[in-house]
Image (cartoon, rainbow, N blue to C red):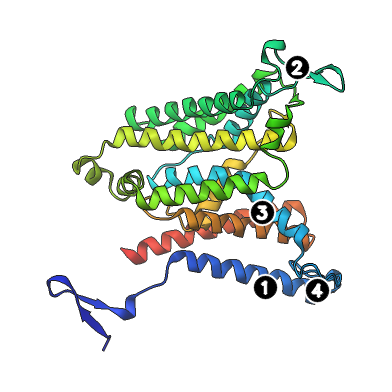
Amino acid sequence: MADTSHGTGGLTFDKSKRTWPNEMNILLALIIIIVVFELIGQLAPYMRGQSFLFDTKDRFDSIFNEARLQIIILQVAVIGIIALGVTQVIITAGIDLSSGPLVAATAMIAMSFAQTELVNGNPNPKALFGPWAMDLPVFIPIVIGLAFGALIGAINGTFIAVLRIPPFIATLGMFLVCRGIALWWSGGNPVSFPTEQFAFIGSGMMPVVWFVLLAIIFHLIMRYTVYGKHTYAIGSNEEAARMSGINVKRHKVMVYMIASMLAAFAGIVLSAKASTAQAGMGEFYELFAIAMAVIGGISLQGGRGSIIGTVLGALVLGVIRSGFTYIKLDGSYQLMAMGSIIIAAVVLDQYRQRSRA
């Protein structure tokens, strides 16, 4: 007989049904994936005993392969920033497909106001505007980029919450709009040569710093604030949330605005990191961001998941992508494998939903 203890109102608690947090499952999966790649490196003849994460060159400063670790976390940092916003959208039982092209559009717009007037003593050959838009304080392109993201998010949220357009259709339409804006803004030409202050935003490991900082902030917001509680309530049961006094329409608009502003900031960081902005930036970013959230345990049905789970999902995705390159898997097979992993994560989520029901 299961060990039980009495609670409020005579209810009993069955300890045998107590489960550990879903984030622990994701962490365990991450460890298993790393072990698998390590075993492939040690056992596969063509790998010649290479290690995935550990230093095999007998250096004494570190036992880890620091270069690969840096590549993994840098790969996921920018998309991870997008995933933080996508997580909040999915928790409300929505979806956002516009974040990838929004990265490109914001990168083009922000970079055009972050250019330096002189390059090696000569006029900037990639200048989009006149001297009035050159060498501006760094906060100006950042504010312009974030304002553009907020505008796109407000439009998405209004279509979805007020006009009742399905999130998939509304954000798919905005996907095309943002990609068109990115191509139109400079006639398809790259915008380059930012100021040193702007370039610093994406220099070195700064993308990782921004990702970690934003993850901590939104973890606290989602866990401890009214905003977070309302977000989960809407995703769990929108009608019940409305009946309890939550302004569902306003809150949904706010969620999509925050998600788009995070995608816009990702575009700013990416353009600063590359010191250039191109219309083709952000391709597939929206899909990878959704994959990070789903792998991290965010339910596509809404109402369940966490920022910590998304961060772990980002690490899982980063390790898998780096591991595929490490074992020399062809790029076409990598895409097929990544797609299979995403489908498997969705199937697992559906299984968990049925089990809970």
- Closer to the chain start, of discs 2 and 1, is 1
Q: CB atoms at circles 4 and 1 under 8 Å apart?
A: no
Per the image, the residue denoted by label 2 is 127
The residue nearer to you, when weighing 168 against 108, is: 108
Mark 1 in CB contact with mark 3 (< 8 angstroms)? no
Who is closer to the viewer here, 254 or 132? Answer: 132
The type of residue carrying mark 2 is: Ala
Closer to the chain start, of discs 4 and 1, is 1
Report, in whole angstroms, how far the alpha carbon at label 1 lies from the one at label 3.
18 Å
- Measured in 3D between alpha carbons, the distance from the residue under mark 4 to the one under mark 1, in whole angstroms, is 14 Å
Q: Badge 4 is on which residue? A: 44
Q: Nearer the viewer, mark 1 or mark 3?
A: 3
Tag 1 residue: 35
Q: Is residue 341 visible?
A: yes
Give the labeled residue for mark 3.
73
Disc on res. 249: none
Q: CA distance from mark 3 to mark 4?
A: 26 Å
Q: Residue at x 77, y 26 (%)?
A: 193
Alpha-carbon span between mark 2 and mark 1? 49 Å
Q: Quadrant of the C terminus?
A: bottom left
Specify few, some or many for label 1: CA neighbours under 10 Å numbering under 14, 14-19, or 20 or more. some
Task: State left or right for residue 245 relative to residue 212.
Answer: left
Locate residue 114, reporting x and y percent.
68, 24
Closer to the camera in the image, 100 or 230: 230
Quarter occupied by residue 279: top right
Does label 3 or label 4 sit earlier along the sequence?
4
**Which is nearer the eye, 40 or 52?**
52
Q: Earlier in the sequence, mark 3 or mark 2?
A: 3
Which residue: 50% across, 51% down? 216
**Coordinates of residue 118 in the picture (x, y in percent):** 81, 19
